[in-house]
Image (tube, rainbow, N blue to C red):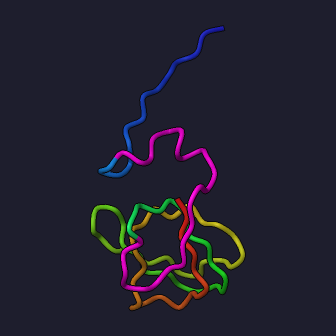
Amino acid sequence: MAFTISVIPPLDPNGFTGPTRVTSGIARTGTVTVDTPYGEFARWLYVGVSGDISYVKWDGTSQTLVGVAAGIWHPIYSISVNSASTTASSLVWGS
């Protein structure tokens, strides 16, 4: 039985998210302070209280997710969370 190996390029400019990093669990966490960069590239956001999240992606553009559920880790690739348009609270980043 043969299978094809795919080469998947990294998703961020520093190469932190190859196929192994995407499928692995959370190694580091930190509390989100809005409008302040985490200091590294995060692959996950934990939402304690549901609401909207406006975040900055690794390429510097912003995106808003509406009605994000509480109590779970969301696979959101980000470098910071914006205070404008963010109504969710008790946020934690993970990488």
In the rendered image, residue 30 lying in the magenta stretch gets the answer yes
Number of numbered callouts drawn: 0
Q: Residue at x 43, y 78 (%)?
A: 64
Q: Is residue 7 left or right of residue 69?
A: left
Give the main secondary structure, helix, strand or loop, of the magenta stretch.
Answer: loop
In the image, residue 92 sits, relative to residue 44, either above or below, namely below
* Residue 63 seen in render: no
Identity of the residue furthest to the top in this view: 1
Residue 76 location in percent, x, y?
A: 51, 64
In the rendered image, the vertical position of residue 46 relative to residue 4, given as above or below = below
Residue at 58%, 88% in the rendered image: 89
Horizontal and vertical percent for residue 2? Answer: 60, 10
The residue positioned 49% from the left and 76% from the top of the image is 65
Left or right side of 2 for 65: left
Which quadrant holds residue 59?
A: bottom left
Q: Quadrant of residue 18?
A: top left
Point 27% across, 68% down: residue: 60
Front residue of 64/74: it is 74
Q: Tell me the quarter of the image containing the N terminus.
A: top right
**Where 81 sits versus 87, above or below?**
above
**Residue range (magenta):** 15-38
Residue 23 horizontal side relative to residue 14, left or right: right
Residue 67, how many percent across, how many down?
59, 82
Does residue 49 appear in this view? yes
25 versus 45 height, above or below: above
